[in-house]
Amino acid sequence: MDQLLLKMSEAKAYIESKLTVKPDIGLILGSGLGVMAEEIESPIKIKYSEIPHFPVSTVEGHEGQFVVGKLNGKNVIAMQGRFHYYEGYTMQEVTFPVRVLKALGVKHLILTNAAGGTNESFSGGTLMLITDQINIMGVNPLIGKNESELGPRFPDASSIYSPEFNAQILDEAKALNIDLKQGVYFYFTGPAYETPAEVRLAKMLGGDAVGMSTAPEALVAAHMGMKVTGISCITNMAAGIQKTALNHQEVVEVANRVQSTFIKLVNRIIEIA
Ligand code: HPA
């Protein structure tokens, strides 16, 4: 068996040995949004550090564990903490958990993140439904040998984020009185926040938000035929638009501030998924 497939199956076997249910929905929780996992009923927690072949998360505000259980009647596996390219992992390592989620039987992946707003109609605390993404960083998680068992060499990327499901989410948000914006997520590797010139570039190229996660995971999920949903919590306006200096503490504070609205929205998304 090829290395990736072997690693996936060993990680899957370990996780399955701890579970009593088969998860259908995957949830990756971004900076300051990890508390959502506390909503999960009769949770089973599995630390990434216990799982064969898993990298270990290092970033502040990320817990580094799976939380598995029921949320709104659905079997959910949440990632409290994720891996980022800026931590020094390869793109294959960053997206390995998504491969494992697929191996576990997850059909729908919900990705969340904190991001900087480049669309000037946004402000700190805005929630943005991701419609599409831009990754021109020169790093792509699908570079390298393709496992045709997982997906095609040249996967279609014309609708990574299900447009049909997105339309449903927008209706549900309206019904919940949540002002959910839509936009394109522009990926930067980080770890430095963008310069104002980079933010102008992202904006000019069609980005509504800038961030350091999500895009690689979404592409890998789409490669394997998973349904993908993405929500950005705009924790700050991007550099140059926001006049004050950017910092991680502000990101976490703002994400915490909108937590209850975010949880309400994600709960409903899971309900209709
Ligand atoms: N840029 C990149 N990532 C981010 C930002 C930002 O402004 N805010 C939160 N995550």
Image (spheres, rainbow, N blue to C red):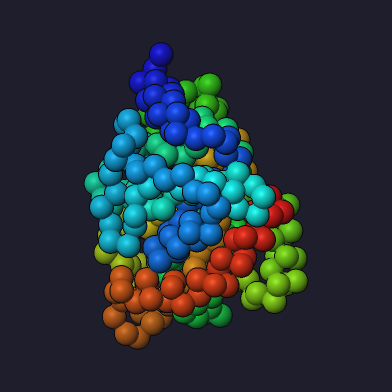
Residue 132 image point, x, y percent: 57, 55
Q: Is residue 204 visible?
A: no
Judge whether 21 appears above or below 5 on screen.
below
Residue 70 image point, x, y percent: 59, 48
Q: Quadrant of ligand 1?
A: bottom left
Picture quadrant of residue 131: bottom right
Judge whether 44 appears above or below 33 on screen.
above
Identify the residue at image location x=52%, y=22%: 148
Identify the residue at image location x=42%, y=76%: 254
Q: Is residue 6 visible?
A: yes
Identify the residue at image location x=50%, y=80%: 123
Specify the farthest residue to the front. Answer: 42
Residue 235 image point, x, y percent: 43, 73
Is residue 102 shown left or right of residue 17? right
Is residue 49 shown left or right of residue 215? left
> Quadrant location of the N terminus?
top left
Residue 52 image point, x, y percent: 32, 30
